[in-house]
């Protein structure tokens, strides 16, 4: 019985492979017009100003502006703003710190000519951080579906941060 099922499975696989190789258009998914490399950035799913943008922008900086070291190409200067209830823990981050649910940490980049750059946001809910990229006007660029695929790179690097996926602001020597 198991063998038959396995054979059947293999057949189904073969048929669907054939299907996708030879008659892609007929299989329900439209044939791609051009070959798009899989690493190409996905088109943004959500476009629109992030609802909390003006609120977050109004919070005072968590520290003096500092040199951005984590986000290549986003701008040389970083200013971090943190939701009021999490500000203190963020400013004194130690290895086992954890920010409460609903914390928001937003890093505002500044370009070399002082113009605003992209804003990188981390928002915690149910113990999980969601990563977002906004343009200087707060429009969501890299979304953040529940699975956060588009911002996987954020997650990977931040997993090696100081505590709770956070690097914290540079500490005084
Ligand atoms: C290669 C590593 C790396 C990647 C990838 C990365 N970050 Fe960061 N991030 C850092 C570092 C390092 C800092 C600390 C600030 C600094 O030194 O520039 C930081 C700081 C931050 C902060 C301030 C909170 C904190 O950790 O102290 C936010 C918010 C943030 N990043 C969001 C993002 C988002 C959103 C993405 C993905 C679009 C992302 N980061 C991708 C390394 C990274």
Image (cartoon, rainbow, N blue to C red):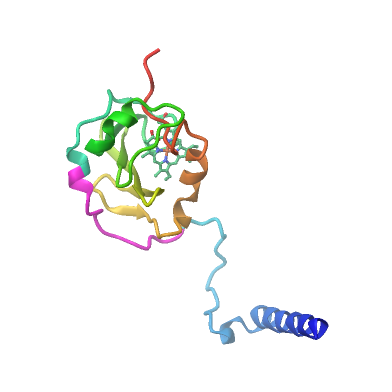
Residue 169 forms part of the magenta stretch: no
- What residue is at 22 percent from the left and 47 percent from the top? 53
- What residue is at 52 percent from the left and 36 percent from the top? 160
Viewer-closest of 25 and 124: 124
- Camera sees residue 112: no
Vertical arrangement, residue 29 with respect to residue 153, above or below = below
Q: Position of residue 2 (x, y in %)?
A: 79, 81
Viewer-closest of 119 and 168: 168
Q: Residue furthest right?
A: 3
Vertical arrangement, residue 66 with respect to residue 49, above or below = above
Viewer-closest of 34 and 44: 44
Residue range in magenta is 42-55
Q: Which image quadrant is residue 112 in?
A: top left
- What residue is at 66 percent from the left and 83 percent from the top? 19
- Camera sees residue 163: yes
- What residue is at 54 percent from the left and 69 percent from the top? 34
Ligand 1 located in image quadrant: top left
Viewer-closest of 99 and 151: 99
Q: Which image quadrant is residue 172 in?
A: top left
Q: Position of residue 54 (x, y in %)?
A: 18, 46
Residue 45 forms part of the magenta stretch: yes
Q: Which image quadrant is residue 48 in?
A: bottom left
Q: Quadrant of the C terminus?
A: top left
């Amino acid at each position: 019985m198991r063998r038959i099922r396995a054979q059947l499975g293999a057949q189904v696989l073969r048929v669907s492979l054939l299907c996708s190789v030879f008659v892609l258009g007929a299989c329900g998914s439209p044939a791609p017009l051009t070959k798009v490399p899989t690493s190409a950035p996905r088109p943004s799913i959500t476009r629109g100003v992030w609802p909390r943008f003006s609120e977050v922008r109004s919070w005072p900086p968590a520290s003096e502006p500092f040199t951005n070291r984590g986000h290549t190409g986003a701008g040389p200067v970083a200013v971090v703003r943190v939701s009021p209830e999490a500000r203190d823990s963020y400013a004194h981050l130690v290895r086992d710190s954890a920010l409460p649910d609903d914390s928001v940490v937003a890093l505002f980049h500044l370009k070399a000519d002082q113009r605003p750059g992209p804003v990188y946001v981390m928002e915690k809910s149910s113990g999980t951080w969601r990563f977002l990229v906004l343009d200087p006007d707060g429009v969501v660029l890299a979304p953040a579906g529940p699975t956060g695929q588009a911002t996987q790179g954020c997650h990977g690097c931040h997993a090696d941060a100081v505590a709770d996926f956070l690097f914290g602001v540079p500490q005084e020597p």
